[in-house]
Image (cartoon, rainbow, N blue to C red):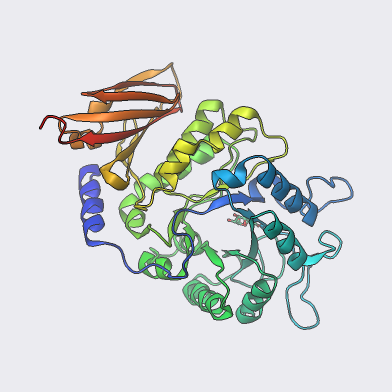
Amino acid sequence: MSLTASVWMLFFVGLWGRTKPLDNGLARTPTMGWLHWERFMCNTNCDADPDNCISERLYMMMADVMAAEGWREAGYQYVCIDDCWMSKSRDAGGRLQADPRRFPGGIKKLADYVHSKGLKLGIYADVGTSTCAGYPGSLAHYDTDAQTFAEWEVDLLKFDGCSMDTTLLEEGYVNMSKALNRTGRPILYSCEWPLYEWPSQKPNYNTIAETCNQWRNFADAYDSWSSVKSILDWTATHQDIIVPSAGPGGWNDPDMLVIGNFGLSRDQQESQMALWAIMAAPLLMSNDLRSICRHSKELLQNRHIIAISQDELGKQGYRTVDHFEVWERPLSQGWLAIAVLNALEIGGPRRFSLKAAPGWKTCTPLCNITQILPQYEEVGVQIGHQVSVNPSGTALLVIMPINDLLF
Ligand code: GLA
């Protein structure tokens, strides 16, 4: 489909509305929080690396920092455990159990601690026979595991898709959704179903959105610009399929924010933050909040970008121009967020005239412009505006059409 046709299709789907999303009252705006995987992976060696291994201490320390250093107030709510928290076997009653050496207090006590900080706890399990790192899977145990998570007062479940026959993915993910619902506890349901289904067939995004609060479509995020860029490219190439299914209650999940780690330059970090907000993506940071630098922290806590991410209209943005890469997200009040990514990885800053953005046509004839990145500036009412964008950097703006100024 041509770019223009795909933008029109998104517009019409927007008019007619989406199918009914999962209605568990959760994820009305994209989820915000912290998830251990990209930064801490499956480090279980607490003897050698007590501060960074997957243990209750790690989540307690992150919860402390999130409550003390403005993260919670900025909107980051969920502290999420990923793979490698479990014992290698279930208990005598067939229930999942945390590794007793690394989680001596158990998950319920950890949940109580996280809740005492005004935050929520996320946990991880797998739809198949084992998790991706080889810990026990939930297949044939969905009700038991959902009940266990509810009793532990967990608030989010990331449900991975390893070790599962792809023809059974739908049944497995739907059954776990029902099992979670039966517990009576609101547990945000984060799926990886489409990611595992794409290699064999085109996923049914209607069923996915009715089943999950967010869903991974593409490969894991790594700490590199090539990884972030490949996620953006995949998303843009499939936007006519995936954008219509996003909205309050259910979101496309392009995976973790790797801002504050080692692989992204300052410009590339700004690009990830701006584009994740445009994509209405969950903002799940995977970094070390105990030692993050000031610039990354300010970027992740930038209230103007978070306001775009959490805009109540709940529409996902899309790429509109693919040489300079202009992404647009409709916001409430008829406003529009525009991200201009300089995709060239050579040369110096390039200038872009906002008049070349498709959304500029809503400025009839004027727009009030606020520039958020690279520097915050209330540009004011203008008939046009030029931004200068560094290689692999992004300018982020909000335009507010002034329709009746002249009357
Ligand atoms: C898969 C998932 C990742 C992470 C790992 C854990 O690769 O896509 O997000 O959960 O498994 O093993």
Name the residue at the front extreme: 407
Q: In this view, does 307 lie above or below 103?
A: above
Q: Is residue 222 above or below residue 299?
A: below
Q: In this view, does 130 lie above or below 217?
A: below
Residue lying at 65% horizontally and 76% vertically, measured from the top left:
145
Q: Is residue 232 visible?
A: no
**Can you tell me which quadrant of the image ligand 1 is in?**
bottom right
Residue 344 position, x and y percent, is 41, 26
Residue lying at 64% horizontally and 80% vertically, measured from the top left:
141
Name the residue at the bottom extreme: 93
| Closer to the camera in the image, 398 or 271 | 398
Name the residue at the left extreme: 407
Name the residue at the top extreme: 348
With 236 as the anchor, is 272 left or right in this view?
Answer: right
With 361 as the anchor, is 386 left or right in this view?
Answer: right
| Closer to the camera in the image, 353 or 172 | 353
Residue lying at 60% horizontally and 34% vertically, measured from the top left:
297
| Closer to the camera in the image, 35 or 116 | 116
Residue lying at 53% horizontally and 40% vertically, measured from the top left:
227
Q: In which quarter of the image is the C terminus?
A: top left
Q: Can residue 192 be seen in this view?
A: yes
Residue 295 position, x and y percent, is 59, 28
Q: In this view, does 288 lie above or below 367?
A: below
| Closer to the camera in the image, 400 or 259 | 400
The image quadrant that residue 262 belongs to is top right
Residue 214 position, x and y percent, is 48, 60
Residue 82 position, x and y percent, is 66, 57
With 406 as the anchor, is 371 left or right in this view?
Answer: right
